[in-house]
């Protein structure tokens, strides 16, 4: 009998903890969604389930004559997608040569990458700022993308090299005997087998720029060029209380699609991360 | 067989000496095409980069001599560029010497010198890794390595608000910045206050998120718990929402005048509004709670993965041996989870050590504290940002960046020595 009672208390406690966690997780999300439908600009007198729900804040965001929100959204997507594409290309190439070739300078190169990936790339903020000014890349998305891609290379190269090392070398050797050239082995033998890690690298390379605030905030100067992180922050920082409901609508429009995307890829993401992460 | 082989001819030495001018040695070795291309390449190199190297090296030493005419910071940039170009040039030069010597040696021992076709094949085979690496590597040099060198050099100058080109020149000051940080009261107090909070923040926030993540994964993973799928989805949610959005939302919730925490929650329990944004200690508590909220799902997901991969017979065997639930947890579950997630756990600590977004987006590193030039919740990285962007203390910021990097690199090297791909058998 006592084991049964034990089981009941254990399960009750478990569900209780889960319930508390549900409240803690969902409350802020519900609050921001509620705020985004609240009429008026400030939150005074609002409630989590608004009495006179309105879509006005969403309309405001989509009106390009009143708000730059749409530009920010497009900028963020553009910068993130381009960073992702270039990172995948460059990282595949470097990781492949580190994994498959033995050349002079390989060990030093690997050590350099290792040390570089430990320094966060915003540690050199001042330098990035001055260099961008000097090359007229300040306030351009090209400059931003270059910094992001460069910053992604060391860490992702290690990650992908770790995975490529696990693909048997006999495969490329037999292909070589059959007369396949360097490029052919790379594109037709190794890359198809490396799809899982390519997906992980692509995801990292997309999320990094999308979520980055610090580099974008020093490089981008004009409001139309902002990415979402910088734009939303400025919106909030300028007059926090006054425009909070509009900010809330903007936050919801980012959080919902990203969360849905994330949850649908989640299983794959976690498995790829543990596979690459613990090995790399 | 004697170890010293003597050759009747000495082509290798002649070729080596001749290739002091790149290409001549190759011509001497009768590799016409190679020789000519080396000659052309080096001539082009000198023609194109002579000025840059000249100005750059001069600028690097003097940092400019006449205000308004010489811009110290641009000169510093040219100087670094000159050095990078020089390093590439020297690399090519050494390669040229080696090549001339090697081919000469082949001729000395009467081996056939490779023909143009063979040379081409060689170039493709040996050059391929360099070729495919070069785009990534070049980008890395300019957007990562270059800035790092720049910051290191900047740490030894007096570049700040009062020494801003073009009106003023910047000068080398040696280790003065380092000395200042430890000797000048205001800097020393701020540095140690910020460092202490950075360490407390890193340790407490990370440990909370790790502990909560593992704890929740274990209780959800109990065999007889129903509704696992929905629990897992909800527990992942804070990870699925971009962090900058969540942090800004929390900044609103903790707002003292209209935020939900003071007005709705604490008000409901009849507690007076708390000064979340104006008292350092409250901001710190809020930050740690928020980071726990943001960070635990990742650990939760990883631990769930590990738990599902633990074979059930381990537990069955333990049950047969009469182990209690707690013993099973202590001796099977926890060690396996910690072992599998250890490398990731350490990266969580380094991540929080540099977690700029949460500190800056939540309250800008504030509230302000008297007697120091960093805010009450500034960690090292956000203090550096503040020094750079608001008070133009560039050289101090650079010095602090170096100190910060030393800490991060030490931890990271220690960690990486343990990972698998570092221990691959043929690292060379």
Image (spheres, rainbow, N blue to C red):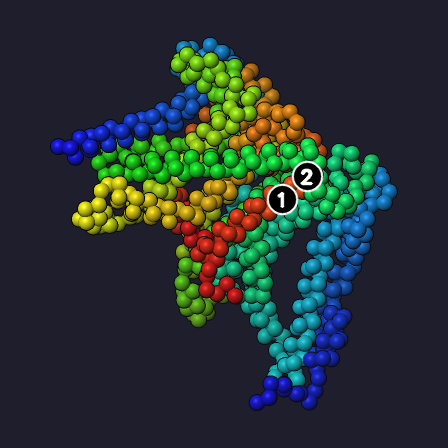
Q: Position of residue B410 (x, y in %)?
A: 55, 49
Q: Residues within 10 Å of mark 2 (few under 14, many from 20)?
A: some
A71 horizontally vs B7: left or right: left
Query: Which numbered tag is attached to residue B305?
Result: none
Q: How far apart are the alpha carbons under marks 1 and 2?
A: 11 Å
Q: Residues within 10 Å of mark 1 (few under 14, many from 20)?
A: few
Residue at the disc numbered 2: B181
The secondary structure type at the circle numbered 1 is helix
Q: Chain of mark 1?
A: B
Q: Quadrant of residue B108?
A: bottom right
Closer to the eye: label 1 or 2: 2
Q: In this view of the protein, which residue sits in the foreground, A260 or B144?
A: B144
Q: State the residue at coordinates (60%, 88%).
A: B2
User: Does label 1 or label 2 sit earlier along the sequence?
Assistant: 2
Q: Position of residue A161 (x, y in %)?
A: 48, 56
B41 horizontally vs A247: left or right: right
Q: State the residue at coordinates (22%, 42%).
A: B324
B350 horizontally vs B4: left or right: left
Q: Quadrant of residue A165?
A: bottom left
Same chain for mark 1 and mark 2? The answer is: yes
Q: State the residue at coordinates (48%, 41%).
A: B349
- Up-down: is A201 above or below B423? above
Q: Position of residue A215 (x, y in %)?
A: 60, 37
Do residues under tags 1 and 2 come within 8 Å of each other at their CB atoms?
Answer: yes
- Up-down: is B34 above or below A16? below
Residue at the disc numbered 1: B403
Q: Position of residue A199 (x, y in %)?
A: 44, 47
């Amino acid at each position: 009998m006592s084991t049964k009672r034990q089981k009941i208390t254990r399960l009750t406690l478990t569900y209780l903890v889960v319930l508390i966690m549900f409240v803690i997780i969902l409350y802020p999300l519900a609050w921001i969604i509620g705020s985004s439908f609240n009429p008026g600009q400030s939150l005074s007198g609002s409630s989590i389930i608004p009495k006179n729900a309105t879509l006005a804040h969403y309309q405001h965001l989509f009106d390009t004559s009143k708000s730059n929100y749409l530009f920010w959204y497009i900028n963020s997507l553009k910068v993130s997608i381009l960073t992702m594409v270039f990172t995948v290309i460059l990282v595949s190439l470097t990781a492949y040569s580190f994994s498959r070739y033995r050349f002079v300078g390989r060990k030093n190169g690997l050590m350099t990458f290792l040390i570089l990936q430990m320094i966060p790339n915003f540690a050199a903020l001042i330098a990035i700022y001055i260099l961008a000014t000097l090359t007229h890349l300040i306030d351009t998305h090209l400059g931003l993308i270059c910094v992001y891609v460069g910053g992604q290379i060391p860490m992702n190269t290690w990650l992908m090299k770790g995975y490529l090392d696990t693909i048997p070398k006999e495969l490329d050797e037999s292909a070589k005997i059959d007369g396949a050239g360097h490029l052919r082995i790379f594109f037709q033998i190794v890359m198809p087998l490396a799809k899982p890690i390519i997906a992980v690298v692509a995801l990292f390379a997309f999320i990094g720029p999308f979520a980055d605030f610090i580099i974008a905030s020093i490089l981008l100067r004009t409001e139309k060029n902002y990415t979402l992180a910088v734009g939303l922050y400025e919106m909030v920082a300028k007059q926090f209380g006054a425009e909070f409901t509009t900010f809330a609508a903007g936050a919801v429009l980012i959080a919902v699609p990203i969360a849905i995307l994330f949850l649908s890829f989640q299983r794959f993401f976690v498995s790829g991360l543990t596979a690459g992460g613990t090995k790399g | 067989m004697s170890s010293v082989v003597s050759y009747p001819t000495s082509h290798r030495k002649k070729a080596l000496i001749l290739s002091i001018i790149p290409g001549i040695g190759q011509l001497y070795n009768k590799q016409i095409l190679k020789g000519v291309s080396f000659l052309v390449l080096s001539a082009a190199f000198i023609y194109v980069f002579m000025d840059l190297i000249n100005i750059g090296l001069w600028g690097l030493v003097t940092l400019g001599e006449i205000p308004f005419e010489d811009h110290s910071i641009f000169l510093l940039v040219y100087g670094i560029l000159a050095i990078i170009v020089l390093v590439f040039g020297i690399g090519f030069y050494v390669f040229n010497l080696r090549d001339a010597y090697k081919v000469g040696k082949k001729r000395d021992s009467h081996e056939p010198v490779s023909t143009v076709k063979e040379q081409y094949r060689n170039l493709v085979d040996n050059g391929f890794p360099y070729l495919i690496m070069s785009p990534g590597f070049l980008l890395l040099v300019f957007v990562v390595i270059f800035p790092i060198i720049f910051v290191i050099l900047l740490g030894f100058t007096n570049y700040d608000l009062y020494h801003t080109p073009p009106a003023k020149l910047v000068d080398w000051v040696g280790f003065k910045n380092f000395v200042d940080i430890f000797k000048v009261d205001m800097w020393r107090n701020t540095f140690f206050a910020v460092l202490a909070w950075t360490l407390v923040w890193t340790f407490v926030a990370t440990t909370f998120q790790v502990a909560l993540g593992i704890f929740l994964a274990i209780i959800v993973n109990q065999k007889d718990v129903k509704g696992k799928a929905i629990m897992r989805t909800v527990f992942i949610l804070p990870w699925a929402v971009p962090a900058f959005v969540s942090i800004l939302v929390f900044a609103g919730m903790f707002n003292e005048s209209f935020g939900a925490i003071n007005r709705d929650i604490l008000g409901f329990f009849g507690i007076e509004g708390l000064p979340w944004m104006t008292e350092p200690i409250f901001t710190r508590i809020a930050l740690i709670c928020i980071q726990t909220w943001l960070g635990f799902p990742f650990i939760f997901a990883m631990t769930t993965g590990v738990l599902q991969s633990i074979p059930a017979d381990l537990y069955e065997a333990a049950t047969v041996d009469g182990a209690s639930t707690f013993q099973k947890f202590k001796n099977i579950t926890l060690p396996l989870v910690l072992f599998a997630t250890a490398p990731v756990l350490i990266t969580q600590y380094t991540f929080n050590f540099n977690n700029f977004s949460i500190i800056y987006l939540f309250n800008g590193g504030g509230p302000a504290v008297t007697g120091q030039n960093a805010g009450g919740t500034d960690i090292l990285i956000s203090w550096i940002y503040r020094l750079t962007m608001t008070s133009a203390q560039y050289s101090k910021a650079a010095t602090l960046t170096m100190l910060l990097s030393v800490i991060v690199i030490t931890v990271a090297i220690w960690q990486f020595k343990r990972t698998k791909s570092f221990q691959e058998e043929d690292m060379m």
